[in-house]
Amino acid sequence: MLDVPAEDVTKAFRTVTRNYQKYAKIPGFRPGKVPESVVRRRYSSEIRKEVIDGLLPERFNRGVRELGVQPVGQPQVTELTVEEGQPLHVKAAFEYIPAFSIEGYKDVTVEKPSVELTDEEFQHEISQLRESRATIEPVEEDRELVDGDWAQISYTGLVDGEPEAAPVAGQDTLVEIGGKDTVAAFNDVLRGAKPGQELKAEVIYPADYAEPSLAGRTVSYEVTVKAIKKRIIPELTDDFAKELGQYESLAELETRVREHMSNRKRRSVAAQTKDKLFAALTEKFSFPVPESLVQDQVDARLDRGLRALAAQGMETEQMRKLDFSRLRAAQRDGAVSEVRTNLLLDKIAETESITVSDEELDRELQLAALQSNEPVEALRQRLTQDGGLARIREQMKREKTANVLYERLPA
């Protein structure tokens, strides 16, 4: 609740009214010569608003400082009385960040896994590269199909109990013998077969089969083996490295792959470990968080989710059909945790005097400008006007604080 003395209110009304007299353009009067009474009638609502805007913000901020709290968002005015010659009375409600202790935060630790790249991880990545360049080649020798081969087949299948249904058919389909995605009945009949053979197979598909039209059905197939093919995985040679990109040798490829994997593992381990540390901190330091911050975080999480759906091809009309009430409710727990984490990081940053320098902010802006193909100064001006620059600095400070906490964890 806030009260402004009557004399201050009267003074504000007179000052604002005189300004309107100077610049008001009203037919029948010369500029600057409009009577005060006419100005008051013509611009009563505008004058009243300017008086309120001139009197309240500074006094509100002073009152908040006296309370010793940090407000969140805009105050909601619940009562307001303002008349010239009378005291201005206002009652407003606002959320604020509650006082909370972080005593003992340095004692909160989680396991910090090694970020060293293992030889097993490296060899797996190299194997994946070889697999990605594999080719399917015909087998010229006269022999039977064995596990690991690929059979080129044509087939037709009739669904049992549905004689009128269109047959299940395929031409020149490749089937891996013994493959994890090949149904057992096909493995059984194709294993040991030769090109030119005609075979029969009965397949009973499980109820949870991926193809709905076949789930829970029994299909009788007639299969013709047309060829045997083999999957050829390339050898690790300099030529293989050159085919993958700008590499002069296999040694260079392996060095680049190892560097990329090491950086990726370092980032992944750090991110996962920080998440665990944040969870441990929020569990130790539990305190209520302002609802407006929670709703802002829910909005941000939903926005990220919708952008991801759009990137996957979801149309706007499909998005409009989503149950947003259910989606918001599902995001709430995560949003509360993120808000609490941010407030803890802010408090730790204040305690440890962690700041973001102008030079660090400039580097971040330069990267953002490159990504958005926008001049740095134009980006800076836009972000300054909409408050984005302050938010970027705030987020950078949190990330810097999180890095300090992560590096401090025992190995």
Image (spheres, helix red, strand yellow):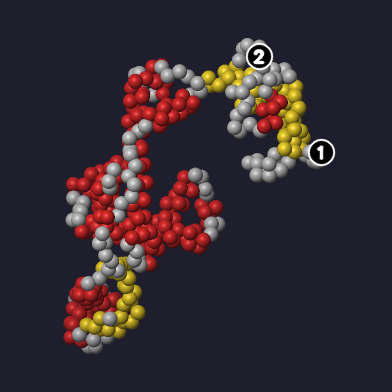
Residue 5 occupies quadrant: bottom left
Q: Nearer the viewer, mark 1 or mark 2?
A: 2
Q: What residue is rendered at 71% in x and 43% in y?
A: 216
Res. 181 visible in picture = yes
The tally of labels here is 2
- Work out which quarter of the rendered image holds the C terminus and state it: top left
Determine whether the residue tagged by mark 2 lies in a helix, strand or loop.
loop
Q: Nearer the viewer, residue 57 or 252?
A: 252
Among all residues in the image, which is located at the extreme bottom? 85
Residue 1 image point, x, y percent: 28, 81
- Image height check: is 207 above or below 143? below
**Amino acid bearing label 2:** Arg
Q: Nearer the viewer, residue 216 or 92?
A: 216
Residue 402 image point, x, y percent: 28, 51
> What mark, if any, has residue 143 been given in the picture?
2
**Amino acid bearing label 1:** Pro
Res. 47 visible in picture = no
- Image height check: is 207 above or below 146? below
Residue 213 occupies quadrant: top right
